[in-house]
Image: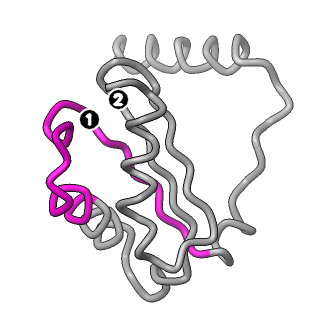
Amino acid sequence: MDKRELIEIITDVYSSLPVQKISVFKKNSETVMVRIISKSFEGMTFSARFKKMDQMLKDANTSFYGNFLFIYEAFTPEELLTLPKPQETDGAVINEDLKHTAREAALN
């Protein structure tokens, strides 16, 4: 199954939700990230949203369900507006900070 076909199937599964936006990214050969913006998530905890998304994909009897690790992001349109914007720094600075923090934790 190619990337395009995988994305089309996943998008079709979630089209039954009142969706404002669906994004599907195949990060690598094992991981697929699915982000849905929908009003149907209002009043639900994040864990309930993830369970719902996972169950929908499982119930669709897709041939690939057990072959990937799915990372779900589920937001209402209002929540999307409050998310922090990506920082203007390059990834190298962020990665160095994380490495430094990890080193400190390992030493303690």
Label 2, label 1: how far apart the Cα atoms are: 5 Å
Which quadrant is the N terminus positioned in? top left
Secondary structure beneath label 1: strand
56 to 87, vertically: above or below: below
Residue at image location 67% in from the left, 21% down from the top: 94
- Mark 1 and mark 2 in contact (Cβ < 8 Å)? yes
Magenta-colored stretch includes residue 69: yes
State left or right for residue 66 relative to residue 76.
Answer: left
Kindly give the residue lying farthest to the right in the view shown. Answer: 88
State left or right for residue 97 relative to residue 34.
Answer: right
Specify the amino acid type for callout 2: Thr
35 to 82, vertically: above or below: above
Q: Position of residue 68 (x, y in %)?
A: 24, 32
27 to 69, vertically: above or below: above
Query: Within 10 angstroms of label 2, few (less than 14), some, or many (20 or more) residues?
Result: some
Query: Within 10 angstroms of label 1, few (less than 14), some, or many (20 or more) residues?
Result: few
Q: Residue 31, which numbered label?
A: 2
Q: Residue 69, which numbered label?
A: 1
State left or right for residue 100 relative to residue 26.
Answer: right
Which quadrant of the figure has residue 2? top left
Specify the amino acid type for callout 1: Leu
Specify the color scheme. one colour
Which quadrant of the figure has residue 59? bottom left
Region in magenta: 54-76
Q: Position of residue 61 (x, y in %)?
A: 14, 54
- Depth order, front residue of 26/60: 60
Residue at image location 44% in from the left, 88% down from the top: 43
